[in-house]
Image (cartoon, grey):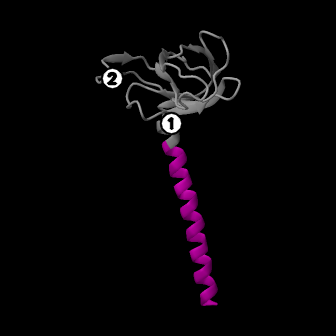
């Protein structure tokens, strides 16, 4: 009989502890709210074509990064398919910052989109291109870019 009482008490303590913890968590959220998200996700889609022929370019690496990080690190990336189309998601920061390395002030939404020909001369040799855009809290951004061939 004593063992049943001890198990019953232990079980009641566990339930009471869980209810208490849940009440504290809800009270904290009610007082302070949820944490702000410093980033939002944007879908980047578009096409890459050759400037001289207007034909789609396969094998171009498209990367998105903000000014806080080095060129090799990305917030998102994708590759163009045989039709020159790309499609990927990237995380965009919600705050302003100054890049001392490039001496550029980025707004809360400015991002650098890099177009890099990584396959060499397989389908032509193209000049890399960097553009700075402002996705302005959009869900999707479409980009159409023409790359020049290297001489």
- Report x, y in % for residue 18: 57, 61
Residue 9: image x %, image y %?
58, 76
Q: Position of residue 69 (x, y in %)?
A: 38, 31
| Relative to 36, residue 67 above or below | above
| Left or right of 116, for residue 48 | right
Q: What residue do we see at 49% from left, 33% from top?
A: 75
Compute the Cα span from label 1 to label 2: 31 Å
Tell me if label 1 and label 2 are in contact, CB under 8 Å.
no
**Magenta residue check for 53:** no
Answer above or below: position of 76 versus 53.
below
Q: Is residue 130 among what the camera can see?
A: yes
- Residue found at x 56% / y 53%: 22
Name the residue tied to disc 2. Answer: 99
Q: Nearer the viewer, residue 134 or 6?
A: 134
Few, some or many residues within 10 Å of mark 1 (<14, 14–19, 20+): few
- Which residue occupies the foreground of this view, 97 or 15? 97
Residue 97's label in the rendered image is: none
Q: Toward which corner of the image does residue 48 lie, by quadrant?
A: top right
Q: Is residue 25 magenta?
A: yes
Find disc 1 in the rendering and name its residue: 33
Q: Quarter of the image containing the N terminus?
A: bottom right
Any part of residue 109 in sight: no
Q: Is residue 109 above or below residue 4?
A: above
Q: Which tag, 1 or 2, sits closer to the chain's start?
A: 1
- Foreground: 89 or 147? 147
Question: From which residue to which does the magenta span run?
Answer: 1-28
């Amino acid at each position: 009989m004593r063992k049943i009482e001890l198990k019953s008490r232990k079980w009641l303590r566990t339930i009471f502890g869980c209810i208490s913890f849940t009440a504290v968590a809800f009270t904290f959220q009610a007082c302070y709210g949820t944490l702000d998200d410093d980033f939002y996700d944007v879908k980047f889609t578009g096409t890459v074509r050759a400037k001289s022929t207007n034909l789609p370019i396969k094998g171009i690496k498209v990367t998105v990064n903000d000014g806080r990080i080095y060129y090799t690190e990305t917030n998102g990336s994708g590759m163009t398919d045989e039709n020159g189309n790309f499609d990927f998601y990237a995380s965009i920061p919600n705050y302003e910052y100054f890049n001392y390395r490039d001496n550029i002030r980025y707004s809360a939404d400015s991002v650098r989109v890099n177009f890099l020909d990584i396959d060499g001369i397989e389908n032509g040799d193209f000049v890399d291109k960097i553009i700075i855009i402002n996705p302005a809290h959009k869900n999707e951004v479409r980009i159409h870019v023409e790359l020049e061939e290297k001489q």
